[in-house]
Amino acid sequence: MRKTGHLNMHSLFALWLAALQGCRPADAAPNASPLQGSNWGNPRRYIHLQTTTDLHNFYLEITLNGLVRKTTNRGSYSVILLKAETRDRIAIFGVKSNRFLCMDGEGSLFTSTVCNRDDCLFYHKLLENHRDIYYSTKNGILLNLDGKRQMYSAGQNLAQSSIFLSEKNTIPLERLQHRERRNRQVDPSDPLSALRFGEDADSRAVQEDDTDQDVDPSEDRNISRETLILHNLKNDTPKPVRIYINI
């Protein structure tokens, strides 16, 4: 037991050191954003991005095969990592799927295994109510889990589904591990060690059942998921995926 405890402490210390590498110092002023401030410490903390509609609270979810969905429950596929390129430009990374959230020129969401600066970076703004919004650096369209397309403009009325609350991750790290092609193990404590901008990298995950219901035990087991319109990454001509709901 003493030896096991020693190993666990060693692992936690190693994860802490990994998180410190490459991180810019936090701002001195307190800030509720996960990108800045003493509460979060650095932009590499795991979170869940929650948004609200008239009926439900939803979380952003990126599956292993690249689907962008909203789900009513926190789970492995809703664990997100925000990586700051600059003070207000970030990449949104699905930890278990090993994919970046991207937006094309028309505002349609898709995912990629590499972070393309043209499509996969978002501006981040912290609102006065300590909620966050994200909009494409390419076209200024707000990230919205209802699929609505709205250009960001300061002082405008924002749709509820484009306003996000960042919740600290509660999913155990071992649930975030997955196999990639050639069975290479991905360390969930540092999935962005392979972060490359604009490079051709075949890091697509092995196809698994994307109906996995590996949710936070504290959540209700009744899961509602809805797929957003997104593009097929395998073709030069994008093909939309039909919206469906699993309950």
Image: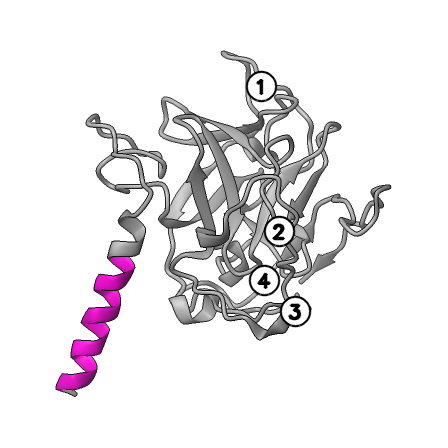
Q: Distance between the residues labelled 4 and 2?
A: 27 Å
Position of residue 150 relative to residue 25, above or below, is above
- Left/right of residue 184 with respect to residue 119 in the rendered view: left
User: Which residue has dot 2 on it?
Assistant: 113
Q: Is disc 4 in contact with disc 3, using a CB cutoff of under 8 Å?
A: no
Q: Is disc 4 in contact with disc 2, using a CB cutoff of under 8 Å?
A: no
Which of label 4 and label 1 is nearer to you?
Answer: 1
- The magenta segment is 2-16
Taking the spot 57% from the left edge, 59% from the top edge, the residue there is 97
User: Which residue has dot 3 on it?
Assistant: 206
Say if the magenta span includes residue 7: yes
User: Which residue has dot 4 on it?
Assistant: 223
Residue sitting nearer the eye, 47 or 15: 15
The amino acid at mark 4 is Ile
Q: Position of residue 155 (x, y in %)?
A: 50, 11
Taking the spot 51% from the left edge, 12% from the top edge, the residue there is 154
